[in-house]
Image: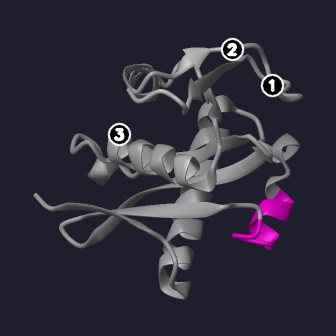
């Protein structure tokens, strides 16, 4: 098995990330039984990838199986968004590798903190975040769902 995580920079790579993010959006909205439009998804995908500082794409044996994005939150803080691994990509450490790439990218951007929100029922994703050092925090944006909010201090290495 060959896992590769790279920053998505070419038009083709960005198109793959966009498609994976849309797959994620369809999955999560079906899973939750409600839309994520409160996150500004219509604008996000109309202007894609303008709302992101960076995007990463994961490949297993040459097949695109996952992606994650880094969005600016404020001048000191980034947000890990849209982590998604396709069913065929799961079980190979893809989610962890994507998170690690995003964490390093956030450090390179000069962020001192990285935020994320997730659903408590996504137990595998939650355990990846916990193992990487994310801790629970108070709600950091207006979100009508019962989400779990987490943060990672980027000034210390985990």
Viewer-proximal residue, 34 or 115?
Answer: 115
Viewer-proximal residue, 77 or 44?
Answer: 77
The image position of residue 106, as x and y in percent, is 57, 48
Sequence-wise, the earlier of marks 3 and 2 is 3
Q: Quadrant of the C terminus?
A: top left
The residue lying at 69 percent from left, 61 percent from top is 52
Circle 2 sits on which residue? 137
- Tell me, for residue 150, which label it has, or none: none
Q: Secondary structure at mark 3?
A: helix
Q: Secondary structure at mark 1?
A: loop
**Which residue is situated farthest in the bottom direction here?**
11
- Tell me, for residue 140, which label it has, or none: 1
- Tell me, for residue 96, which label it has, or none: 3
Q: Are marks 1 and 2 in contact (CB under 8 Å)?
A: yes
CA distance separating discs 3 and 2? 21 Å
CA distance separating discs 1 and 2? 8 Å
**Image height of 147 relative to 65, above or below:** above
CA distance separating discs 3 and 1? 23 Å
Sequence-wise, the earlier of marks 3 and 1 is 3
The residue lying at 64 percent from left, 36 percent from top is 112
């Amino acid at each position: 098995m060959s896992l590769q995580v790279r920053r998505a920079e070419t038009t083709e790579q960005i198109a793959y990330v966009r498609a994976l993010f849309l797959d994620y959006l369809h999955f999560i909205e079906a899973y939750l039984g409600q839309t994520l439009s409160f996150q500004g998804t219509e604008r996000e995908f109309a202007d894609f990838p303008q709302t992101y500082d960076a995007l990463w794409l994961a490949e297993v044996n040459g097949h695109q199986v996952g992606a994650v994005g880094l969005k600016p939150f404020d001048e000191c803080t980034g947000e890990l968004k849209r982590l998604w691994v396709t069913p065929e990509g799961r079980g190979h450490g893809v989610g962890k590798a994507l998170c690690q790439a995003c964490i390093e990218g956030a450090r390179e951007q000069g962020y001192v903190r990285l935020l994320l929100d997730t659903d408590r029922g996504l137990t595998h994703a939650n355990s990846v975040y916990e193992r990487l050092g994310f801790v629970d925090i108070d709600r950091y944006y207006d979100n009508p769902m019962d989400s779990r909010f987490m943060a990672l201090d980027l000034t210390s290495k985990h």
